[in-house]
Image (spheres, rainbow, N blue to C red):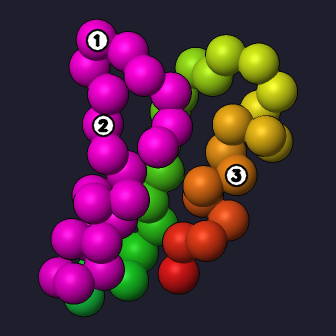
Amino acid sequence: MGEQSVSEINFRNVFAVIDRLGYGGWVSMECRLAGDTMLRLGWFRGMP
């Protein structure tokens, strides 16, 4: 999933925990992607 780097964060797991805790506010992330942004963020489309 996502870009591989020295310090990859599994955002799918992070967002799942935030959801499980019942947080209803805004969440943002910052990332630097290699290549086409929309293609690289394709995994995000399936998030609830």
Q: Which residues are magenta?
A: 1-21
The type of residue carrying mark 1 is: Val
Q: Disc 1 or 3, which lies upstream in sequence?
A: 1
The CA distance from mark 1 to mark 3 is 21 Å
Structural crowding at the residue carrying mark 1, measured as other residues with C-alpha within 10 Å and reported as few (<14), some (14–19) or many (≥20): few
Question: In this rendering, is residue 33 above or below 46?
Answer: above
The residue labelled by disc 1 is: 6
Question: In this rendering, is residue 13 above or below 10?
Answer: below
Give the camera-side residue of 19 and 35: 35
Asked if the magenta segment contains residue 10, the reply would be yes
Query: Is 18 placed left or right of 3 in the picture?
Result: left
Q: Position of residue 35 (x, y in %)?
A: 77, 18
Question: Is there a contact, CB below 8 Å, between mark 2 and mark 1?
Answer: no
The residue labelled by disc 3 is: 42
Q: Position of residue 38 (x, y in %)?
A: 81, 42
Query: Is 45 placed left or right of 25 in the picture?
Result: right
Question: Is there a contact, CB below 8 Å, between mark 2 and mark 3?
Answer: no
The type of residue carrying mark 2 is: Ile
Q: Position of residue 13 (x, y in %)?
A: 27, 60
The residue labelled by disc 2 is: 9
Q: Disc 2 or 3, which lies upstream in sequence?
A: 2
Question: In this rendering, is residue 31 above or below 19?
Answer: above
